[in-house]
Image (cartoon, rainbow, N blue to C red):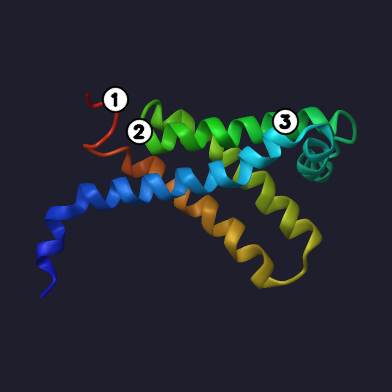
Amino acid sequence: MLKFLGKYREAGLLLLRASVGLIFILICAPVLLSGEHRWWQFGSAMRVFNFHSHLDWWGFLGALAGCVGGIFIMLGFAFRIGILLAFLVALVNAIAVAHHEHGLYSIIIPIEAVIVLVCLSFIGPGKYSVDKG
């Protein structure tokens, strides 16, 4: 019945890439632009891994990785590098949330982000990407 949607597979992948990339940019760009206090808050997730110093630098690097990864995912340029950067940010967030929150509903969204990024790494950027020219 809905077989005609199959010919829009590449457009659907472009929409998925654009929305996932935009989400990472919308989350990480305000952190990147806010300064050291907000970087420290963002980087405090690294305490889960026993990193207790230079949390502002960890936060800055995480916000930068999320923004650059989101841009790369949206454009399809250096797609798997962008996926890796966004994946690292999402994985640290998922582990930090799972460590501090003790309920299934609080960790579902971070885990879902990680799963979507892993799936996108297997699928690839598709036909509509900057790399394809």
For the residue marked with disc 1, what is the amino acid?
Answer: Asp
Q: Residues within 10 Å of mark 2 (few under 14, many from 20)?
A: many
Q: Amino acid at mark 3?
A: Phe
Q: Residue at x 81, y 59 (%)?
A: 100
Query: In the rendered structure, which amino acid carries the disc numbered 2?
Result: Gly
Which mark, by number, is residue 38?
none
Q: Quadrant of the N terminus?
A: bottom left
Q: Earlier in the sequence, mark 2 or mark 3?
A: 3
Horizontally, residue 102 falls left or right of residue 78, namely right
Q: Secondary structure at mark 1?
A: loop
Q: Which secondary structure lies at badge 3?
A: helix
In the rendering, at what x and y percent does residue 119 appear?
40, 49
The CA span between labels 2 and 3 is: 24 Å
Q: Which mark is residue 60?
A: 3
Q: CA distance from mark 2 to mark 1?
A: 6 Å
Going from N to C along the chain, the mark reached first, 2 or 1, is 2
Would you call the spot at circle 3 few (<14 residues within 10 Å), some (14-19), or many (20 or more)?
many
Q: Position of residue 3 (x, y in %)?
A: 11, 66
Q: Earlier in the sequence, mark 3 or mark 1?
A: 3
Mark 2–mark 3 CB contact (< 8 Å): no
Residue at 75% x, 51% y is: 96
Q: Are marks 2 and 1 in contact (CB under 8 Å)?
A: yes
Residue 11 horizontal/vertical position (percent): 23, 49
Residue tagged 1: 131
Work out whether residue 48 or residue 31 is closer to the camera in this orientation and state it. Answer: 31
Location of residue 35 (image quadrant): top right
- Residue carrying label 2: 76
Quarter of image, res 133? top left
- Image point (58%, 62%), residue name: 109
Cα distance between the residues tagged 3 and 1: 28 Å
